[in-house]
Amino acid sequence: MIRHRGTIIALSGEPGNQRNAQVEICSESACAGCHAASTCGFGKPKRKKIQALLPQDHTVCVGDDVTLQLPVKSGFFAVLIVYVIPLMLLLLPLLCLSSVLAEWAVGMISLGILTLWYTVVYVFRRFFERHSVIRKENITEISG
């Protein structure tokens, strides 16, 4: 599991139904504990905002501290969808069609296929959200 602590900064949806929470997390680099981190600049924490689904029976308020958990398998699925498949869709037409067509035509075909892929990902974003983002049952409150 990949875990991040964060703070709920906004809630949307009706209580009792499936709700979304906007959570702000602070990611720190591995060198944050270094004694020279303040002078080199690489150890500065970065704040990120993440949308997460809340369970129907989960009661939280704005300002609550929570732990977000994402299965590693879901992270690999997201990398496959966003990086690996588009790279293949970009390179395969270049390799297969470069001996048949002009370079500019092959490049335009590759970019067109890539544009089509990201359009499909956008259209089916709700499906991908359920399989690649933080699952609602994995949001738990941090105790004390």
Image (tube, grey):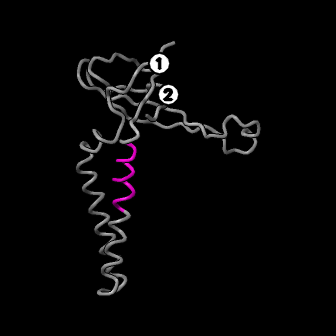
Q: Position of residue 123 (x, y in %)?
A: 23, 51
Specify the amino acid type for callout 1. Answer: Ile
Residue visible at 24% across and 18% down in the picture: 16
Magenta segment, prevailing SS (helix, strand or loop): helix
**Distance of label 1 from label 2 (alpha carbons):** 8 Å
Residue in the foreground of this view, choosing between 130 and 105: 130
Which span is picked out in magenta? 74-86
Question: Which mark identifies residue 5?
Answer: 2
Give residue 42's quadrant in the image.
top right
Q: Is residue 112 left or right of residue 31?
A: left
Q: Residue furthest top?
A: 144
* Residue 80 falls within the magenta-colored stretch: yes
Q: Residue 45 placed where, x, y %?
A: 60, 37
Q: Quarter of the image containing the N terminus? A: top left
Looking at the image, is 107 positioned above or below residue 126?
A: below
Relative to 46, residue 113 above or below: below
